[in-house]
Image (cartoon, rainbow, N blue to C red):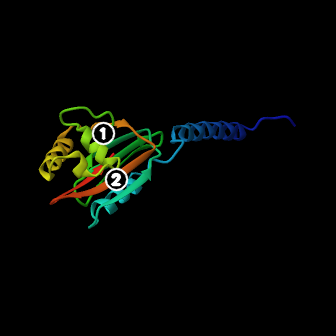
Amino acid sequence: MFETHVDATYAWLGLAVVSVATAGVAATLPASPPPDASGVAHTVETVATGEYPATAEHGIAADRLRLTPRSVSLAGDGGRARVSLRGARITPIVPGEGSGARDRRLRRVLDGVPPDAVFDDPDALAAAARRARAADHGWRAAPERLTVRRIHYGGVHVTLVG
């Protein structure tokens, strides 16, 4: 009456192994989806390809951010996401700007100061933008919001992102 069937023992062992394997796979899955780099890229491209000066902001749900003149990359608990920009080149403005390739004047313009109040002439703006695009574009702590501003000063058209 209390006999153990050999087949039942193997079935229980097999079920236990499958359960442990399933739990292991579930534990390795990310807890959250990857950051939304395509949404950020869409906001950047909408402003960058516009005909007129414009400003936009986009919220970021990521831990780290990498901006280059041709791409936006985000990283967080859910992984990494990178999107190439198809429109005009952007000018990344990184936090903690100092002298040299990182120009505080560009940060002021991104924050809303008119370019003619910050730069002596359009050539000075173009030179500062070139230096910012050529600077190091490494990973940085991501802010809560990304600001995109397209400006026109004389014949110079620049899209600042920071």
Instruction: Out of 16 and 136, give the one closest to the viewer.
Output: 136
Question: Image quadrant for the N terminus?
Answer: top right
Q: Are marks 2 and 1 in contact (CB under 8 Å)?
A: no
**Dot 2 lies on which element?**
strand
The x, y position of residue 157, in whole percent, is: 20, 58
The x, y position of residue 144, in whole percent, is: 46, 43
- Position of residue 93 in the picture relative to residue 24 (left or right): left
Mark number, residue 148: 2
Please identify the quarter of the rendering in which residue 56 is found: bottom left
Q: Amino acid at mark 1?
A: Val
Question: Image quadrant for the C terminus?
Answer: top left
Judge the density around disc 1: few (<14), some (14-19), many (≥20) Cα neighbours within 10 Å.
Answer: many
Q: Is residue 44 visible?
A: yes
- Position of residue 123 in the picture relative to residue 102 (left or right): left
- What residue is shown with label 1? 94
| Residue at screen point 81% across, 35% down | 3
Which residue is most to the right?
A: 1
Q: Which is nearer the N-term, disc 2 or disc 1?
A: 1
Mark number, residue 72: none
Which residue is most to the bottom?
A: 51
Q: CA distance from mark 2 to mark 1?
A: 12 Å
Please identify the quarter of the rendering in which residue 11 is found: top right
Q: Is residue 69 visible?
A: no
User: Relative to residue 9, is residue 67 depicted above or below?
Assistant: below
The x, y position of residue 48, in whole percent, is: 28, 59
| Residue at screen point 28% across, 65% down | 52
Q: Amino acid at mark 2?
A: Val
**Dot 1 lies on which element?**
loop
Judge the density around disc 2: few (<14), some (14-19), many (≥20) Cα neighbours within 10 Å.
Answer: many
The x, y position of residue 129, in whole percent, is: 19, 47
